[in-house]
Image (cartoon, rainbow, N blue to C red):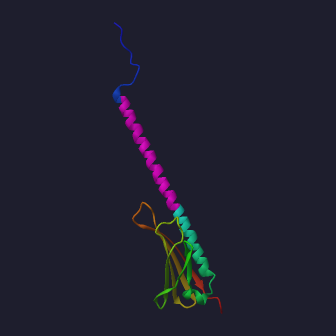
Amino acid sequence: MKSRSKKGFVLPEVMLAAAIAAFAICGILLMYIKAMDLIRTSKNASVATNYAQGIMEQVRNTPFKNIPDMVFEVEVGGVTTKYFPIVVNSNLTRWSFPLPVVTLPASSCAVYVDATDSDLLLVTISVCWRQSNRTVDSTVELATQMANRSY
């Protein structure tokens, strides 16, 4: 009597191999999606940092005594809007305005100048935006101290 030789896979082996392959492909796709989200977050953080550095340069190019009275001009869609300072208390001045950056959804900028010491200003710039798939705002914050050198 001749015995038959096995020349193929049986159904359970094929099902197990397909399940392992599906599990591996899902893991790879999940890593790809997460990497794309991190790239988007990194790009937005870079844009926000560049914008905050531009605002910081505007503050640095302003004479020391004029910093608490600065007026920021923001152009959105061809319309220029002026944002005047809001005096929070005798030592703290604040500006808040939307960002004219299209790539940052629901973004805004806040500039704080703390003049507790009359010869040293603490300038803080905070840029906030909403990532498309998150409920919490992302923030980039720059801070510097500026000394009065007009003796």
Q: Residue at x 41, y 19 (%)?
A: 7
Location of the N terminus (image quadrant): top left
Of 22 and 105, nearer the camera is 105
Residue 125 to residue 15: above or below: below
| 138 inside magenta stretch | no
Residue 134 to residue 81: above or below: above
| 23 inside magenta stretch | yes
Q: Position of residue 37 (x, y in %)?
A: 47, 56
Residue 25 to residue 97: above or below: above
Q: Which residues are magenta?
A: 13-42
Q: Position of residue 101 (x, y in %)?
A: 54, 68
Q: Residue at x 39, y 15 (%)?
A: 5
Q: Residue furthest top?
A: 1
Quarter-of-image position of residue 68: bottom right
Q: Residue at x 34, y 27 (%)?
A: 11
Location of the C terminus (image quadrant): bottom right
Q: Residue furthest bottom?
A: 151
Q: Residue at x 59, y 81 (%)?
A: 59
Q: Residue furthest front?
A: 78
Of 83 and 140, nearer the camera is 83
Q: Residue furthest right?
A: 151
Looking at the image, how many numbered discs can be counted on the residues?
0
Q: Position of residue 38 (x, y in %)?
A: 49, 57
Magenta stretch: dominant SS?
helix
Quarter-of-image position of residue 63: bottom right
